[in-house]
Image (cartoon, grey):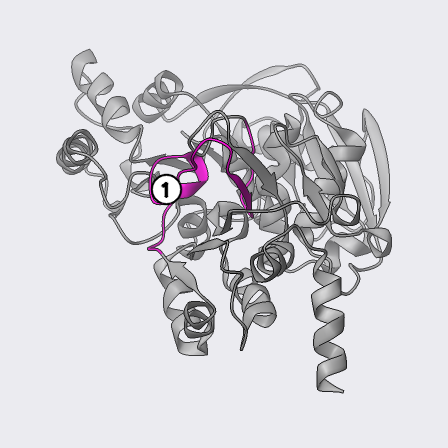
Amino acid sequence: MTWAEEVLAQKAGQSDVAVGEYVVARPDAFMMHDIFAADVLELLERTGIQTLDCPERVSIIFDHMVPAPSEYAAAHQKKARILAKKYGIHHFYDVGRGICHQVMVEEERVGPGDLVVATDSHTTTYGAVGAASCGIGSTEMAYALATGTLWFKVPETVLVWLENRLPWGVSAKDLILSLMKTIGSDVAQNRSLEFLGPGAVSLELASRMTIANMGVEMGTKFALFPPERKTRAGPYVAEYAVDLASVKPMVALPHHVENVAPVTEHEGIPIDQVFIGSCTNGRLSDLREAASILRGRHIASSVRLIVTPASSRVYQEALREGLLEDLVQAGAIIEGPGCGPCFGGHMGLLAPGEKVIGTHNRNFQGRMGSLQAEIYLGSPLTAASTALTGVLTDPRTIMASQREGNS
């Protein structure tokens, strides 16, 4: 069986499953963030359900509207705190702990072979640790919390076989953007992506999280790096082979994540704001990459640079390493861990006609403010290089000049 089939079979208490089969399974973990937690728990309360099936498996993480930007958001969060206590949810992470997907991995709330559901579409992130994970709606979550079970349709699986290693100046964000261009969203729609091969083994956890996180932008149900599997399983509905050594710095152009091209084809576009952070690229390795470009330099006078570490742990470690000092001296604004700029909540919205390049996962029209703004997506290296020059820039250009200066 494919890894998705193995996990679903185990959690459904079956020896095997077949593609297209509907199974009732018991997830290992449930997660809600501040936008949906109060609504889900209120629904249970109105229904008369007084206890959860397995409160010890439930996590609530405040990360979207933090710190609360409005009276409504503050009241919504207060309601969630009260209901979380009523229903015995002890794994509660309040304002400041970090972005939900980063926290779930840091706190080891998810692990290899787990089945995980959450009220956020980028729950596919946990595929980086070998967990079959996906986003669900509020009503589904209420049912799952009450019963401890949920139905799943066993998906077809698409194999992505990775060879070699990523070259100098190229990161996992460039790889997943390349796959967006190659595979698109039609092939992977409601299917599972399984990443295998020596190239997959070469990727560190942070890189796997970036790739699995953006799997949902391709329409996937799961995006999985199966643990300890070095050979093809099967059967697969489609197979793709990717030579990591051939991947280049890529950029997603407005207004769709599939609208991808090499950065070199669009260099020189003026950028007003640069955003480095989110559940896609706000980890320590991402901040290290950004700092490696900006250390000892200053961003262009025409650019605003916003940085949001993915969690309080990432924030603290970046402080210890001096990364935040490097970024602040370069002209960056360091915000607390959260999702605000990414989804257009607060702390970095765009005016009509403005352009931003960010390390986040979506560039839909109007996502970060004005419908007349333009969102570009790239790696931390590309974002930092663009902040330095004020125009869309291939990071290898900056990195090459740094090498020459140090030689």
The residue beneath circle 1 is 340
Identify which residue, 201 or 94, lies in the foreground: 94
Q: Position of residue 190 (x, y in %)?
A: 64, 21
Identify which residue, 289 or 88, lies in the foreground: 289
Q: Is residue 111 left or right of residue 238?
A: left
Regarding residue 2, the answer to whether it shows in the image is no
Task: Tell whether position 209 is magenta.
Answer: no
- Magenta span covers which residues? 335-364
Q: Position of residue 78 (x, y in %)?
A: 14, 36
Secondary element at tag 1? helix
Q: Position of residue 378 (x, y in %)?
A: 63, 47
Q: Is residue 65 left or right of residue 48?
A: right
Q: Is residue 83 left or right of residue 325?
A: left
Identify which residue, 386 or 113, lies in the foreground: 386
Q: Amino acid under label 1?
A: Gly
Q: Residue at x 12, y 35 (%)?
A: 82
Q: Main secondary structure of the magenta part?
A: loop
